[in-house]
């Protein structure tokens, strides 16, 4: 077999045996993968759980929004609500501190049912939203999110009202306590990676390419025989799967689920995370989530250190996001793309 130019140090023949998608992975991605795999070896429980655990879970929810907005041109504010729906279903059908409401089903029945209900909810929401465009899509999905928030807060028979459900724990599989820092870190890392790869795969599949065609010119795609509405609704269903899994993980991480989990504030936070990270690539939501979690976690300490009231930590978070979006409407990924373009331009300039 002839040597390939993709090899390192004369190893082109061996790298040519690798699948095409594997050869396309940037070396920096492999370095990041190694870093994340071995992070528990040198990071304490707080960093694993409160920083990276949260970043992975919120990144997955933002990833579902990024898939709809980046590949489908549909900015949906219902993704956090879908995640909250999955979390509620897990608490209602499974175990919690309120066993007079929770049904106590085993985990192998509770998790699939919770995901199915969340996906159905996300699909119905998508079916209502796909017939609108632009600001109207944002408003109708925001209306659905607000309705879910007030319904769960006022319903005590099924959703236990304002209090929600406490003591919601992950199942004890393989004798591992998945609520502990390191097990939950690897659990959330696994599902975040799986979601990331799933979005990459779907975006390059025939369905994903058709969805991007619908985003760019819906009329032309419809003239070519594609069912535009069906593609958009299917996109909502796929995004709901990712958001639903993240919602169950979020419930395990918090140990509880309440109306505030899927309130209007968290709904807007997911949009901010996706926009700050960037909507051009699936890695953007995770970058935005990590920035959000770091600011949210350490902004309070920073304010206290400089003698400012602790209540202003939201202002510090808002200023951080404002600066990123101000300098780059495409978020952090846009800044990275600009920096690389300038670097290539400098290298091409004659001395």
Image (cartoon, grey):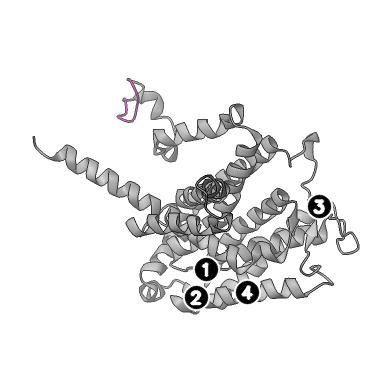
Is residue 76 found inside the magenta-colored segment of the image? Answer: no
Callout 3: SS: loop
Near mark 4 (Cα within 10 A), the count class, few <14, some 14-19 or many ≥20, is: some
Q: Is residue 268 visible?
A: yes
Label at residue 76: 1
Q: Quadrant of the C terminus?
A: top left
For the record, the magenta segment spans 1-9
Given the current orientation, which residue lies at the most extreme right position? Answer: 100
The residue drawn where x is 33% and y is 56% is: 327
Is residue 2 found inside the magenta-colored segment of the image? Answer: yes
- State how far apart marks 4 and 3 are (Cα): 25 Å
Q: Percent from the top left, x then y, of residue 121?
A: 66, 69
* Residue ID for mark 3: 167
- State how far apart marks 2 and 3 are (Cα): 36 Å
Q: Are marks 2 and 3 in contact (CB under 8 Å)?
A: no
Q: Percent from the top left, x then y, of residue 114?
A: 73, 60
Between disc 1 and disc 2, whose residue precedes? Answer: 1
* Residue ID for mark 2: 137
In the rendered image, the vertical position of residue 301 relative to residue 28, given as above or below: below
Report the mark closest to the observer, 1 or 4: 4
Between disc 1 and disc 3, whose residue precedes? Answer: 1
Report the mark closest to the observer, 4 or 2: 4
Q: Quadrant of the N terminus?
A: top left
Between disc 1 and disc 4, whose residue precedes? Answer: 1
Callout 4: SS: helix
The residue drawn where x is 50% and y is 69% is: 232
* Residue ID for mark 4: 146
Q: Main secondary structure of the magenta part?
A: loop
The residue drawn where x is 61% and y is 58% is: 243
């Amino acid at each position: 077999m002839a040597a390939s130019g993709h090899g390192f140090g004369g190893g082109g023949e061996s790298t040519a045996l690798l699948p095409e998608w594997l050869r396309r992975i940037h070396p920096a991605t492999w370095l990041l993968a190694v870093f994340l795999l071995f992070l528990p070896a040198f990071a304490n429980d707080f960093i694993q759980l409160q920083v990276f655990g949260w970043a992975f879970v919120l990144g997955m929810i933002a990833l579902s929004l990024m898939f709809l907005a980046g590949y489908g041109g549909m900015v949906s504010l219902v993704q956090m609500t879908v995640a909250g729906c999955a979390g509620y279903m897990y608490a209602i059908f499974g175990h919690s501190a309120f066993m007079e409401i929770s049904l106590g089903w085993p985990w192998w029945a509770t998790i699939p049912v919770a995901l199915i209900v969340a996906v159905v909810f996300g699909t119905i929401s998508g079916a209502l939203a796909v017939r609108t465009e632009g600001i109207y899509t944002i408003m109708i999905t925001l209306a659905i999110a607000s309705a879910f928030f007030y319904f769960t807060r006022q319903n005590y028979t099924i959703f236990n009202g304002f209090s929600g459900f406490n003591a919601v724990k992950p199942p004890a599989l393989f004798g591992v306590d998945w609520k502990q820092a390191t097990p939950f870190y690897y659990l959330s890392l696994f599902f975040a990676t799986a979601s990331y790869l799933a979005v990459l795969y779907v975006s390059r599949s025939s369905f994903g390419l058709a969805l991007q065609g619908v985003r760019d010119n819906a009329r032309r795609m419809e003239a070519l025989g594609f069912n535009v509405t069906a593609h958009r609704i299917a996109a909502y269903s796929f995004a709901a799967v990712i958001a639903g899994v993240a919602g169950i993980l979020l419930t395990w991480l918090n140990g509880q689920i309440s109306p505030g989990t899927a309130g209007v504030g968290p709904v807007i936070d997911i949009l901010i995370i996706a926009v700050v990270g960037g909507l051009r690539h699936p890695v953007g939501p995770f970058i935005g989530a990590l920035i959000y979690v770091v600011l949210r976690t350490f902004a309070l300490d920073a304010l206290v250190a400089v003698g400012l009231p602790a209540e202003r930590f939201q202002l510090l978070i808002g200023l951080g996001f404002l600066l990123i979006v101000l300098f780059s409407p495409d978020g952090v990924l846009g800044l990275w793309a600009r920096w690389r373009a300038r670097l290539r331009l400098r290298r091409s300039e004659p001395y």
